[in-house]
Image (spheres, grey):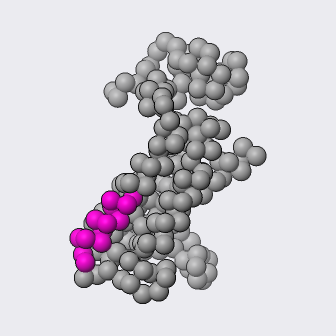
Amino acid sequence: MLGRKTEGSVVCPSCGLLVGVNDDECLNCGRRNPGLWGFAPVLARLGRGDLAETFPQVVLVSCSILFVASLAVDPDGIRMGGILGFLSPSIRGLFLFGASGSIPVFELGRWWTFLSASWLHGGLLHIFFNMMWIRQLAPGVGELYGVSRMIIIYMISGVVGFSFSSFAVYIPILSSFGPFRPGGITIGASAAVFGLLGAMVFYS
């Protein structure tokens, strides 16, 4: 399925030598799970060229299209108040395109929003700063970890961030800390951005 390889050898993304597709680590360089569960060949094909440079552009274009769409679907609900709230889509517009949080996840069973919410943004300044950070961090993480792992780090960080913000509603102590209160509706690429930043810090 999707070109997944279940047997034989693949090229280690770190050292470029052959390793078994199911090896736990590369015997030459020590990279853990060099076969990436059999998807290493597929990801290697995707990684040819300058994907580390183009991935931020893909994210930027996708987020921009969804931002405009979330505004267009409910123009009467657009909020313009203040610098942080300038051009904010309505809750209805964000919900239609996959906003996450305790309400969509637990009340409506929309678990898939853990994946979609990081592509949505709540204002012009919000999307500008997130896209700027992705443009700054993604190429560096791609160079340090490899393009395929950079994309995995980005996606998993977003999922973990929205999972935490949704489940945090059941942690009573968080409800008393204003800016850290768990949200009923949550959006934005901040969790994915901090995942990239954390990966660079971990690499020292």
Decide: is 134 above or below 78.
Answer: above
Residue 44, given in percent of the width and then of the height, sits at 48, 27
Quadrant in the rendering for residue 63:
bottom left
Residue at (33% x, 59% y) in the render: 65
Q: Quadrant where the N terminus lies?
A: top left
Q: How many numbered callouts?
A: 0
Quadrant in the rendering for residue 106:
bottom left
In this view, the residue farthest toward the right is 204
Decide: is 14 above or below 92.
Answer: above
Region in magenta: 63-75
Residue at (48% x, 38% y) in the render: 51
Residue at (30% x, 63% y) in the render: 97
In this view, the residue farthest toward the bottom is 81
Q: Is residue 199 magenta?
A: no
Residue at (30% x, 72% y) in the render: 71
Residue 159, given in percent of the width and then of the height, sits at 48, 54
Left or right side of 201 for 52: left
Decide: is 24 above or below 111.
Answer: above
Q: Is residue 64 magenta?
A: yes
- Give the overall secondary structure of the magenta segment: helix
Residue 169, given in percent of the width and then of the height, sits at 50, 72
